[in-house]
Structures are given as structure tokens and as C-alpha cells.
């Protein structure tokens, strides 16, 4: 079959579910991943033929896309901070908004001569690994409650040749670590059950609810607990960074104020939503 005919089939089967631009992007990602063909190949070779064996993984992917499975799960990787990260059903797919949080931290610590950072709820390890890769003086730790997530994060750390200390812990129960950190960062679960109606089927059906959702009654449960933890495990002057629910920016900022944090800054993401929060610890709060 001609490769351009396969592309036309993708559009005829998927354009009702996704935008034409998304469908084209999926197709080009797949031919690069499955066939090692660059996206400009059709422009250079419009009559390129592929074999039945080469067609098979493309049509398998098409079937999965029709069920709205994320393209990142199909190819097994996601692009984040100019790096490829392995992803699967046990971790969230890294988002571009989270890149903005990582770049904020990098900018503020780029001249640090010694630095200890903790990433809470590391998932694929994208935040911790990106910081370890770009902040050469940083000693990076990362924790998660999921053994499967930690195993995948370890694979990603090895892939990108960085040292990260991974810890399997439940942050809702953890009180102290035997390390004092210069910075703690977290992108914890923050989507309220009532917000599910705003989400796409590919997220709802294929990404881990454990890493996404909180109850309507206690939407800041992780933020409160992590802020309490940070107040005991940061050095005085240490900095706490959060990715947050866009609808709860002021409420989340108040948590930091209530736990001895100052110089609090709330930032919007590329889409104009309140998405990132920072505060500096003024005094320790060990009980």
C-alpha cells in the first residue's frame, strides 16, 4: 500500500474524533516511531510503498486511537524538556505546563553551587530527571507511592544518565526524611471529581486516577499535607514549588501563608490559567 493511502485512511477514520492537525501529528509520530521515517518523507517520496508487515503496526495504532488511547501510550514515550520519557498506564503523561514549572526552578537555581531538591509524586520522573539533567550541582530525590511508577522513573533516569534517589513513600503519612532540602517541588493530584466533565476521554480512560483526582470535599488534601511536610523538611529559606488547580490558586497560596512561607508568587501558564505557586520558608515548624 502507498504510505499516503495509509495517511488518508487515518484521516477518514479519525477526523471526527480529533482535529485534522492532531491526526496528521499522530500519523507522523507513528511512522517515525514504527518505520523510522521522517515526517517529510511523503513530500520527497509521494508514491512510497510500504509492505504488509510495515502496515500492521500502523493499523494497530489506528484501532487504539479510535478508542482514544493516548498516542504517548501507543508509542511508549512522551516528549518533555527536549527529552523522551518512557510512559505507560501507571504514570501521568508529562504536560507542557509542567515544563514551565521546571524552567522556573531552573532559572532560580542555575547559579547554585550546592543544592538538594525533592520531587513529591514523581510519576515518570520527568520533573526530577529534568532538574538533575539541567542543574549539575543538584542532588535530586524523588518519591512516589506507586512501585510501578518508581520502576519506570528509574528506567528514565538511567536512559538520561542522571543520578536520582528514588523513595517509595506515601506523602500523606510521611513526616520526616533525614535530609534538609533547598527546594521541594510537587505536581500532586488536584482535579476535583466535579471537573471530570471538562476532561477528555483519552485522559479519563487511560491515565491513572490515583495521580489525577481528589474529592470535591477535600480538594487541597495533598497540598496541605505537602506544605506541612515542607515546613519541616526544607531548610530555612528553602523554596516550595507547586503545580496547582487553576481554580484554587488563592486557597492554595493561603496554605503556604499559614505554614510560615512568604514571598509567595502565583504564576499563570501559557494558557493564561493560574498554574504555578512558589513560597519561601521563613522558619521551621517541627513539632
Image (cartoon, rainbow, N blue to C red):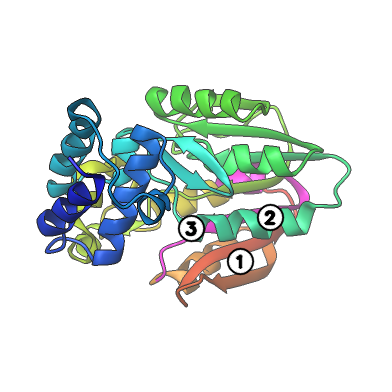
- Location of residue 61 with respect to 158 vertically, above or below: below
- Residue 137: where, in percent of width, then height? 82, 38
Q: Helix, strand or loop at disc 1?
A: helix
Mark-to-mark CA distance, 1 and 2: 20 Å
- Residue 60: where, in percent of width, then height? 17, 35
Mark 3 near mark 1, Cβ–Cβ under 8 Å? no
Task: Give left or right: position of 65 versus 276.
Answer: left
| Camera-nearest label, 3 or 1 | 3
Mark 3 near mark 2, Cβ–Cβ under 8 Å? no
User: Around disc 3, counting alpha carbons within 10 Å, would you say few (fewer than 14), some (14 to 19), or many (20 or more)?
Assistant: few
In-front residue for pair 88/30: 30
Mark-to-mark CA distance, 3 and 1: 28 Å
Q: Which mark is residue 105?
A: 2
Q: Let me know if residue 269 appears in the view.
A: yes
Q: Residue at x 25, y 45 (%)?
A: 3
List the single residue furthest toward the right: 113
The residue wearing badge 1 is: 257
Task: Give left or right: position of 43 versus 204.
Answer: right
In-front residue for pair 3/168: 3
User: Around disc 1, counting alpha carbons within 10 Å, would you say few (fewer than 14), some (14 to 19), or many (20 or more)?
Assistant: some
Task: Give left or right: position of 278 versus 275.
Answer: right
Q: Tell me which numbered mark, 3 or 2, is placed earlier along the sequence.
A: 3
Q: Tell me which numbered mark, 3 or 1, is placed earlier along the sequence.
A: 3
- Location of residue 124 with respect to 253 vertically, above or below: above
Q: Residue at x 39, y 45 (%)?
A: 93
- Residue 116: where, in percent of width, then height? 74, 38
State which region is magenta. 228-246
Mark-to-mark CA distance, 3 and 2: 15 Å
The residue wearing badge 3 is: 96
Q: Residue at x 44, y 54 (%)?
A: 95
| Camera-nearest label, 1 or 2 | 2
Amino acid at each position: 500500500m502507498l504510505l499516503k493511502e495509509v495517511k488518508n485512511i487515518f484521516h477518514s477514520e479519525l477526523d471526527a474524533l480529533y482535529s485534522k492537525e492532531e491526526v496528521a501529528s499522530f500519523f507522523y509520530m507513528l511512522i517515525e516511531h514504527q518505520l523510522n521515517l521522517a515526517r517529510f518523507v511523503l513530500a520527497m517520496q509521494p508514491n512510497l510503498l510500504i509492505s504488509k508487515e510495515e502496515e500492521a503496526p500502523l493499523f494497530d495504532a489506528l484501532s487504539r486511537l479510535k478508542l482514544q488511547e493516548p498516542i504517548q501510550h501507543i508509542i511508549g514515550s512522551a516528549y518533555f524538556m527536549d527529552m523522551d520519557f518512557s510512559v505507560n498506564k501507571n504514570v501521568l503523561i508529562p504536560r507542557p505546563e509542567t515544563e514551565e514549572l521546571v524552567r522556573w526552578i531552573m532559572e532560580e537555581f542555575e547559579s547554585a553551587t550546592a543544592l538538594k531538591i525533592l520531587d513529591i509524586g514523581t510519576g515518570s520522573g520527568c520533573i526530577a530527571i529534568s532538574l538533575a539533567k539541567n542543574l549539575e550541582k543538584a542532588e535530586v530525590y524523588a518519591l512516589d507511592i506507586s512501585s510501578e511508577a518508581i520502576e519506570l522513573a528509574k528506567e528514565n533516569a538511567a536512559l538520561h544518565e542522571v543520578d536520582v534517589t528514588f523513595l517509595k513513600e506515601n506523602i500523606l503519612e510521611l513526616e520526616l526524611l533525614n535530609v534538609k532540602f533547598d527546594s521541594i517541588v510537587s505536581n500532586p493530584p488536584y482535579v476535583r471529581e466535579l471537573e471530570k466533565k471538562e476532561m477528555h476521554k483519552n485522559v479519563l480512560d487511560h491515565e491513572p486516577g490515583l495521580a489525577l483526582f481528589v474529592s470535591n470535599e477535600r480538594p487541597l488534601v495533598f497540598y496541605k499535607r505537602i506544605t506541612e511536610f515542607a515546613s519541616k523538611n526544607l531548610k530555612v529559606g528553602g523554596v516550595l514549588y507547586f503545580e496547582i488547580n487553576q481554580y484554587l490558586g488563592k486557597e492554595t497560596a493561603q496554605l503556604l501563608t499559614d505554614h510560615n512561607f512568604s514571598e509567595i508568587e502565583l504564576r499563570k501558564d501559557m494558557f493564561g490559567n493560574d498554574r504555578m505557586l512558589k513560597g519561601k520558608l521563613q522558619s521551621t515548624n517541627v513539632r
